[in-house]
Image: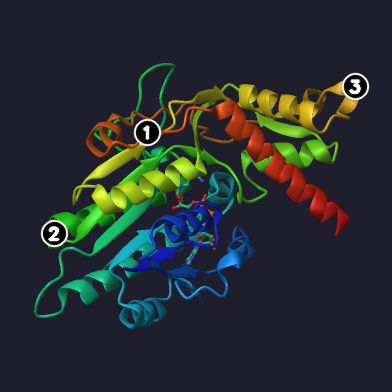
Amino acid sequence: MRLIVTGGAGFIGSNLILHLHNHYPDAEILNIDKLTYASDISHLDSLKLDRRYHFKKMDLVDRKDVRKAVQNWKPEGVFHLAAESHVDNSIKGPEPFVLSNVIGTFNLIEECRQLWFDEQEPIHHHRFLHVSTDEVYGTLGETGSFTEQTPYAPNSPYSATKAGSDMLVRSYFHTYGLNTVITNCSNNYGRHQHDEKLIPTVIRKALKYEPIPVYGKGDNVRDWLHVDDHCRALATVFYDGSTGEQYNIGGDNEWKNLELVHNICDILNEKVGNGPDGDYKNLISFVTDRPGHDFRYSVDASKIKTELGWSPTQDFDALLSQTVEWYVDRYSQKRSS
Ligand SMILES: NC(=O)c1ccc[n+]([C@@H]2O[C@H](COP(=O)([O-])OP(=O)(O)OC[C@H]3O[C@@H](n4cnc5c(N)ncnc54)[C@H](O)[C@@H]3O)[C@@H](O)[C@H]2O)c1
């Protein structure tokens, strides 16, 4: 099956391409990525010479390029992940978020519609999977979880642009009958994440003996899901999900930010040692909170579990430890090169 994966040089996209390549032998993948600062195409070096993998450097905001790529490749399915993804950057400068996340999504889905529906026989079985976030639902208090029925209430420019793109994709199902599915996932962790995100930042700063920044008092709560579980969920929804449906994806694994940072420091204490006064926690430094910082996200993933039989791996300690080791290796190699 000819697939397009957008954002395949990013964190989740690169893991997804490896997952699809390993588990779906008939998948022929075109990776479309602009290669922004957040990407690292070397994560896919192992596929460079593979006949089932192709790469095109391209900005989804450029409609002509999107048209050419879609018309040439003639995808039978799309996994759309490309996006500007860092909330702090969206607060400093929202424009690239509006362009990539909203206009980029429009260009891609509209070109797919023209390819799949403008022929004499419209093709209804080619599927467009739009990958989104739980942040579109806004924030929660101490209790409760987001379901697929929770009204959207995005609070940052990042989540607002993701919400906008979700709505566009939804409208292509209701208006044109395009075969769409949307997923809304909680925070991912695992290999290949960009340095700027929370877990890599904690590890990088700790190894350099620099202050480990924690927003506010570190009380904000996030649900954490391993990236491999997310990739498995995306493939499950793509191949088995019902047309026009939306699926929440989460790890049943909530942590306060400060607890998570403590866990990472404990792993570093055990695996690396040499923390200041014997403990990397001594580097934690509380910094002014992010404006409009959502207090808590929690995802009710019952629908994907009961309807599609997906469930998250329940071994956070081992997977977090594995993740920390991957970044320790990465940062030690960078220091020695
Ligand atoms: N990371 C998470 O915890 C998480 C959780 C839920 C949902 N998501 C969603 O999953 C998707 C991937 O997230 P990620 O963490 O891998 O992001 P990322 O920032 O690591 O990767 C995004 C990729 O998209 C590419 N890209 C950005 N703008 C582009 C454009 N205009 N044209 C072509 N390529 C472009 C970048 O070069 C990068 O390789 C995003 O849509 C994000 O909203 C992420």
Tell me the residue that label 2 is attached to.
Answer: 175
Return the x and y of residue 195 as percentages of the image width and height: 67, 49
Write the residue at 76% across / 47% down.
329
Callout 1 secondary element: loop
Q: Residue farthest to the front?
A: 25
- Which quarter of the figure has residue 273? top right
Return the x and y of residue 146 as percentages of the image width and height: 33, 29
Near-viewer residue (40 or 233): 233
Return the x and y of residue 327 as percentages of the image width and height: 71, 44
On the rendered structure, is 111 left or right of 65?
left
Callout 3 secondary element: helix
Q: Is mark 2 within 8 Å of ligand 1?
A: no
Q: Are marks 2 and 3 in contact (CB under 8 Å)?
A: no
Tell me the residue that label 1 is attached to.
Answer: 311
Tell me the residue that label 3 is attached to.
Answer: 277
Q: Amino acid at mark 3?
A: Asp
Callout 2 secondary element: helix
Query: Would you call the spot at circle 3 few (<14 residues within 10 Å), some (14-19), or many (20 or more)?
Result: few
Is residue 337 shown to the viewer in this render? yes
Which callout, 2 or 3, points to the residue nearer the camera? 3
On the rendered structure, is 281 left or right of 336?
left
Which callout, 2 or 1, points to the residue nearer the camera? 1
Query: Would you call the spot at circle 2 few (<14 residues within 10 Å), some (14-19), or many (20 or more)?
Result: few
Return the x and y of residue 287 as percentages of the image width and height: 70, 30
Q: Amino acid at mark 1?
A: Ser
